[in-house]
Amino acid sequence: MNIDVLKSTAKELVAPGKGILAADESTGSIKKRFDAVSVESTPENHRIYRQLIFKTEGIEEYISGVIMFDETIRQLTDDGVPFPKSLQDRGIIPGIKVDTGAKDMANFPGEKITEGLDGLRERLTEYKEMGARFTKWRAVIAIGDVIPIKTCIESNAEALARFAALSQEADLVPIVEPEVLMDGNHDIKKSEEVTYKTLKSVFAKLSEHRVDFSGMLLKPNWIHPGKESGQEAVDDEIAETTLRVFKDVIPVEVQGIVFLSGGDSPEESTGHLNALNKMGDAPWQISFSFGRALQKPVLEKWGGKSENVENAQKEFYKRAKLNSLARSGKYEKEMEKED
């Protein structure tokens, strides 16, 4: 493990004004996105869409890195350049999702465990040779009447720690993503309680596995009322509650926090990020690693039609810029109406 390499890459990924694009939807997930805009989900259409995003002019001003899926990292641009090299040539760091998905946890109804540790060391070597400089692993924690159970939280925390240790061994910066889902009718206090317990467990396991906090990034959820709770997600309350918990459980050595959007709209996600950065009281870089919150409007503009590529790229540039502004607390909702 070369900690200087890890620190340098982590620092680049959370450089001021920049954030990470999560373009790592699995085959099943991207099919859902494409179905929503009536586009056939094929490897070639996936490639065309990814190229549209990756080749948007000027995004290197606002996007520091891109997380890819296994299919994507192996694909080429129209002119035969591998996607990782095409991104790197523009100063955008290539990354790769390495988990193989969340599966039902045996004997624990409603709980999930993320798989993908088998053969991971060898896969990391291959991805590094292909140009990847960072990795990501997502764990899923659901909230219900009797869940999550301690066993579920600890099992996922253990897997995240093993993933992070293997990534650092390969000089790849791990993005550790323990996502407490927004799905459910729970209030913000329940989200706070479960997020606190989850992060406590995750950092305990990371410490046990000797993961260097300065060579990793955390991709957490916002502390947020359940989507079916009927409670409004107010930016300031979400930001204040989230920061209070994070200060209690996240070591200051962590280079940065790159939030997931978790099902919020693009505008809501950017608003939460802006509110937290406006507070100006965090010991880490507070950034973003959005998927749907950056891409949903882009997909809708594109719709699988070549004549829509330019407008779709303009939309992606706009969303990247708005989230860049939110990194310094300078985003205003009125900006959404500007062309």
Image: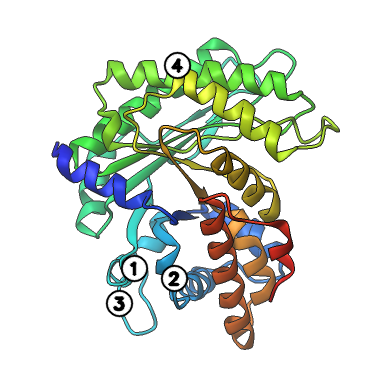
Q: Which residue is drawn at 60% across and 16% down?
A: 108
Along the line of sight, which residue is nearer the eye, 203 or 283?
Answer: 283
Q: Does residue 271 appear left or right of residue 83 in this picture? A: right
Q: Disc number at residue 286?
A: none
Q: What element carries label 1?
A: helix
Q: Does label 3 or label 1 sit earlier along the sequence?
A: 3
Residue for badge 3: 81
Contact? badges 1 and 4 (CB < 8 Å): no
Q: Which residue is drawn at 61% across and 55% down?
A: 292
Give the camera-side residue of 89 and 32: 89
Relative side of 49 to 250, left or right: right
For marks 3 and 4 on the same chain, the one whose residue lies earlier in the sequence: 3
Spatial separation of the CA atoms under disc 1 and disc 4: 35 Å
As shown in the figure, which amino acid type bears the numbered disc 4?
A: Ser
Mark 1: few/some/many CA within 10 Å (<14, 14-19, 20+): many
Q: Is mark 2 on a helix, strand or loop?
A: helix
Q: Which mark is residue 54?
A: 2
Quadrant containing the C terminus is: bottom right
Q: Quadrant of residue 105?
A: top right
Residue marked by disc 4: 201
CB under 8 Å between callouts 1 and 2? yes
Residue 273's image quarter? Answer: top right
Residue 185 position in % (x across, y down)? 80, 27
Name the residue tied to disc 1. Answer: 87
Marks 2/3: CA–CA distance: 12 Å
Q: Which residue is drawn at 56% across and 52% down?
A: 326
Report the number of discs: 4
In which quadrant will I find the N terminus?
top left
